[in-house]
Image: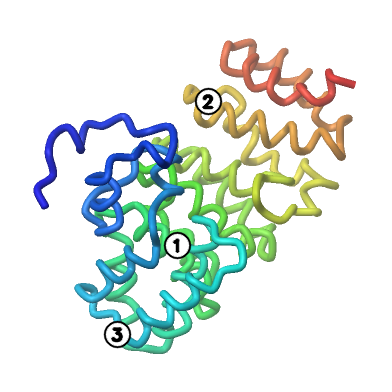
Amino acid sequence: MNITSDVLNRKGATKIENIPTEVLQLLNLGRIETVNLTEWLAVNHAVLVTSVFPEMSVSEEVINKIVLELKQQKKASAMNSVKIVGGILYKEYVNSDAYEKLFQKLNSHISDSVRCYATYFLALNKNISVEDKFLNLKSLISDAHFGVREVVWMALRKDISENLDFSLKFLSNWAESENENVRRFCTESTRPRGVWCSHIDQLKEKPELALPILEKLKSDSSKYVQDSVGNWLNDASKTRPDFVTQLCERWKKESPTKSTQYIVKKALRTILKK
């Protein structure tokens, strides 16, 4: 199937039923990336793994196991499907000589959905330190695709929570990265409450622990990062409004920039509603 310029340059349908048949077929074959959330949610992961895994030397037995598990979901979702695929691959190949090669194939695949599998395939590995997980997944943390970037921080969330002191120290260095996606990861992955993920109780009670990260991003030039910092502080404001109020007041004095003003406005939105 040829991939036309119209397909490559598409904006993406706003409803799943409006996705062109050709586009959906190419997505499920792993030949193209999704361009928006609607397409990301529409991918048939059972078809995708059947299409791409044979060429990656994944055994037919493992593929069948994955497909069966996907079809047996009580409440199917794209996010849960990604976890299932990455999780089964991890269990089947963690002690195999093929583990590293398979990770590289997943990590570099043209399909964003397949790259999403790579996040859990590596993040679930208990034999790898959290530092090495950060380093090995950095290319996905800085991935050009929005879906991959969201999935990778969710895949690492448990490790970050269980190794919080180390993670905050490590990420405080990444907060100085030239790549806005890496900087954004530092706050999005450590949000006290977050979205579609478990809370980090220690940061809900002691948000000041993350100041080494937050301080470096208080006037970030990227709106993508600004939104994340503002949302991080808004999360914290629900348990520690005193901390967020005082920090924002200080930031307004120390950093009178439009970037900081924008962050402060987002950070205080819950407090100001009361």
Check disc 3 and report the residue beneath it: 59
In the image, residue 272 above or below residue 97:
above
127 left or right of 39 in image: right
Residue 113 sits in quarter: bottom left
What residue is at 70 percent from the left and 39 percent from the top? 211
Q: Earlier in the sequence, mark 2 or mark 1?
A: 1
Q: Position of residue 109 (x, y in %)?
A: 26, 59
| Whole-number angstrom distance, CA of label 3 to CA of label 2 | 46 Å
Q: Is residue 232 visible?
A: yes
Q: Nearer the viewer, mark 2 or mark 1?
A: 1
| Vertical position of residue 177 compared to residue 269: above or below | below
Front residue of this view, candidates 87 and 167: 87
Residue 136: tell me if it is visible: no
Query: Which of labels 3 and 2 is toward the front?
Result: 3
Q: Which residue type does callout 1 highlight? A: Thr
Q: What residue type is disc 3 on?
A: Ser
Q: Residue at the spot x=40%, y=41% of the render?
A: 17
Furthest residue toward left = 2
* Quadrant location, the C terminus: top right
Q: Which residue corresponds to the image point at 53% horizontal and 25% vertical from the top-left?
A: 220
Q: How crowded is the residue under tag 1: few (<14 C-alpha within 10 Å), some, or many (20+)?
A: many
- Find residue 226 and report its horizontal and vertical position in percent: 57, 27
Q: Which residue is mark 2?
A: 220
In terms of secondary structure, where does tag 1 sit? helix
Residue that label 1 marks: 119
* Mark with earlier residue (3, 2): 3
In terms of secondary structure, where does tag 3 sit? loop
Q: Is residue 273 above or below residue 230?
A: above
Tell me which label, 3 or 1, sits earlier in the chain.
3
